[in-house]
Amino acid sequence: MAGEAKVTRVEIETFAWQANGMTTVRVQGGQLKTAYDPDAVATQTGTAIKLVTDAGAVGEYVRGGAGAHEVAAGARLLLGRGAHEREPLYHELKNQRVYGFLDVALWDLAGKLAGLPISKLLGGYRQRLPAYASTIDGAVSGPLSDPGSYADFAEQCRQLGYRAFKIHPFPWEEVQTHVETVLAVAGRVGSTMDLMLDSFCHYRTFADAVRVGRACDEGRFFWYEDPYGDGGITPFSHAKLRELVRTPLLMGEKLRNLQERMAFVLAGATDFVRGEVGTEGITGTMKMAHAAESVGLDLELHGSGPAQRHVMAALRNSNYYEQVWVHPVVTSTEPPVYADGYVAGLGAVGADGCVPVPEGPGLGVTYDWDFISRHSQGKVTVAADS
């Protein structure tokens, strides 16, 4: 396209911050779960990117995770590209971990060049998004360390305005404790909130997944997510689980791309479909949303952030925004990098049970680059002559 702004330089910076009360718990198979421990202090990392163009416009994106050198390898493919050349990048990088990070930054740039929020570029279906409170993986002690405290927190979230609540259970060895937690939460708020359970593939046998699933049936849960230790990737066993459990399944978080998710759908192995902005970007997630819509299914977005809000704002076939990971004490685990009125964490929801969609161009948020610089762990610049 003649005269289109081209990316001439990419700046990538990794930063870190301290989160009081956060720890990790190792469970069977070496898997790590994020949990609350009142005596712990965890170091969280994030990555920030700037796409600088020859027209002066800058695309920006900040999120937790990733690393500067990892992102830099893929970022070289952006040099000389215009903000609207996203489809070629999707096919070149769609199976790479860094793809989603780069794609979102390109969408931010496109929105700024157009003077429109990303949600409007995508279709602009709504501006208020129904949200669910998505807990951290329980606690070593205190809140979220036992079934009753999960029920207490669900009630607190309902009072804040949330319409739905998702349990990430503490990795208790006894499956019966998981069953009791499901039933405790359902007994307390089940008549007034949609409820979800995400074990993050914790249950080590198919039988344990069935036991917990039948508790979800009793509690009339809205969905049952990534139940057991196959890693969330086996269509046959999840199709069989659907025969034995009435609660709808939500699968796809552990799958890599559109093709794998649609194979799961066509095998009859899920009821809702996961959308992964973090790994598949906005481009790949919109493809997945439309593919799900073509067979009459809903897509539920994974994780929190401005990018997820813009995508959900453009979708008809999506029910809830995931406000992750929340806890009565640790109220937000998102990077504290916003210099405007954007609110993350437990307090993001309004009295109507919804979160707003940023209205400015691109992602519509202003990042606190001073905070990022003060907490920098290293910076990489990629340019045509580097």
Image (cartoon, rainbow, N blue to C red):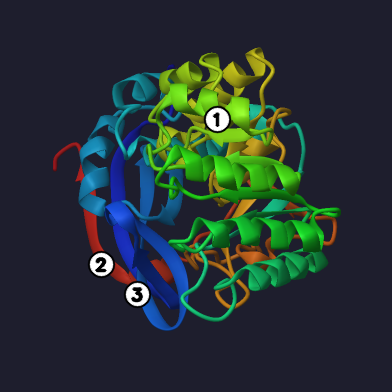
Measured as percent of width and height from the top left, residue 273 is found at 57, 30
Identified by mark 3, the residue type is Arg
Q: Secondary structure at mark 3?
A: helix
Q: Name the mark on residue 377.
A: 2
Q: Earlier in the sequence, mark 1 or mark 3?
A: 1
Q: Name the mark on residue 241.
A: 1
Find the distance from the CA under tag 3 to the CA under tag 2. 9 Å
Q: Neighbour class for label 2 at 10 Å: few (<14), some, many (≥20)?
A: some
Find the distance from the CA under tag 2 to the CA under tag 1. 45 Å
Q: Residue 30 sits in which quadrant?
A: bottom left
Q: Is residue 90 above or below residue 313?
A: above
Q: Residue 91 sits in which quadrant?
A: top left
Q: Which residue: 37% across, 55% down?
A: 48
> In the depicted view, which residue is nearer to us: 196 or 178?
178
> In the depicted view, which residue is nearer to us: 356 or 189?
189
Quadrant in the picture for the C terminus: top left
Q: Is residue 205 above or below residue 64?
A: above
Residue where numbered disc 3 is placed = 374
Q: Which residue: 45% across, 42% down?
A: 228
Q: Which residue: 86% across, 53% down?
A: 191
Measured as percent of width and height from the top left, residue 289 is found at 59, 25
Q: Secondary structure at mark 2?
A: strand
Identified by mark 2, the residue type is Gln
Q: Secondary structure at mark 1?
A: helix
Q: Name the mark on residue 135.
A: none
